[in-house]
Amino acid sequence: MIDIDAVRAGIPALANSVYLNTGTFGPLPTVAADEIRRAYSEVERLGTFSPPIFAEMELQGFEAVRGQVAALLGASPAEVALTRNVTDGINIVLHGIDWQAGDEVILTDQEHPAGTVPWLALAQRAGVVLRWLELSLDSDAVMRRFEALLTPKTRLAQLSHVSCLTGFRLPVGRLCATARQAGVLTLIDGAHAEGQFSVDFQTLGCDFYAACGHKWLLGPQGVGMVAIRRELVEMLRPLWLGWDVQQSYDRGERRYQLQTTAARFEQSTRPWPLYLAFGKSIDFVTRVGLDKIETRVQALRSRFVAALSNLPGVTVLSPVAGARGTGLITARVEGWSCEALQERLWKRHRVITNIIREFNALRFSIAFFTTEAELELALDAINLAVRGESPKIDT
Ligand SMILES: Cc1ncc(COP(=O)(O)O)c(C=O)c1O
């Protein structure tokens, strides 16, 4: 059992709203905010490049967080680069491959713009052909469509672990196994997986796994990660290069030696205190336990989805039951534009949600710290909107 009161006491933002938007940005726990304050106070007190600061933050601290991220992902530290966000991870992979015109890349039709815009630009620039995998809530149908898209020219498939539009948890293990059999690389966007359930990079069988710290892991904005399968680290070409703490550079000979680990994808000056704080957020989440988190969120979401589906005029676009559902629940309310409903929930009920504009729907994020009472309140708020108000449709 999770001690919900203790957990909530550690996340002050929860006292000020019904926070159902962890899928966009998770609320920051006090331990992480304290670490940011502590680290910057030390920087202020001692000077940015004083030996203790350098040793604590840039060397030991950052590497310790790399170790935490590696443990979280089930990867080795040599396979992990600490980035700023998911976008960084996607671009590291995309720009690291030597593309030929006519190479094919499969993307789901529900990738976040962070995972489509770079590919659209690559298609335009390098003649890479994009093939779109249509998602639905049916894993077997997704598998069949994926198999049908594979051709001898397919080089890579980018797949969200969890769709940001519906919260559907893709059968990523099966997709990666099929891709690998066909000699196709796989890049998983784990933005909505990390912190919602356990992820094991090795058993998942993907080649690259990109994620961020600022959603379900409750880290500060500006920290992320990418795991790169060990054999591929030196095959992937780093596009952005610079100085790094352990890279060697011979000024006389004008030669440099890149690191042989995934750290070669990290460059130059970084906001080290934020990574230290990220380490505290990871501790906070993993102390609760990812298995317990998954179990609790499954129970909360099942009841919420069932109740939501029963409201008149509400269409749930997320999986209704079963393990393919996650804490992201998307629903459309008849007669309401998503913007107007989002604003009303915030202004009248202090319920924070996000919108999925393409479906004219609201997205509710249920996290392990969400309570039954909060979900009841959100349901009542939607019910009131459905029944009590004249329809508001933005024209
Ligand atoms: C599935 C998915 N991928 C990528 C992103 C972009 O994340 P970042 O800002 O960390 O690059 C988001 C953001 O919401 C997302 O939902």
Image (cartoon, grey):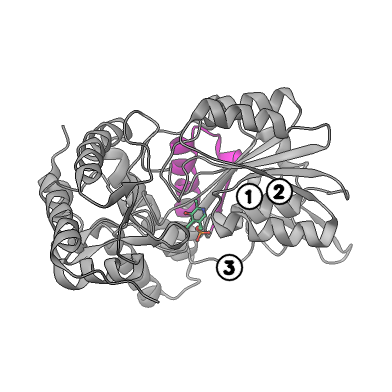
Q: Residues within 10 Å of mark 1 (few under 14, many from 20)?
A: many
Residue at 29% across, 60% down: 28
Give the position of the C terminus as an image quadrant: bottom left
| Element marked by disc 1 | helix
Q: Which residue is mark 3?
A: 269
Residue 351 visible, this angle: yes
Please determine whether, in this image, residue 213 is positioned above or below residue 303. below
Mark 3: which amino acid?
Thr
The residue range painted magenta reads 61-83
| Element marked by disc 3 | loop
Decide which of tag 2 and tag 3 comes sooner along the chain.
2
Marks 2/1: CA–CA distance: 7 Å
Residue 300 x/y as whole percent: 21, 39
Mark 2: which amino acid?
Gln
Q: Residues within 10 Å of mark 3 (few under 14, many from 20)?
A: few
Locate residue 191 relative to residue 29 in the image: left or right: right
The quarter of the picture where residue 15 lies is: bottom left
Q: Which residue is mark 2?
A: 259
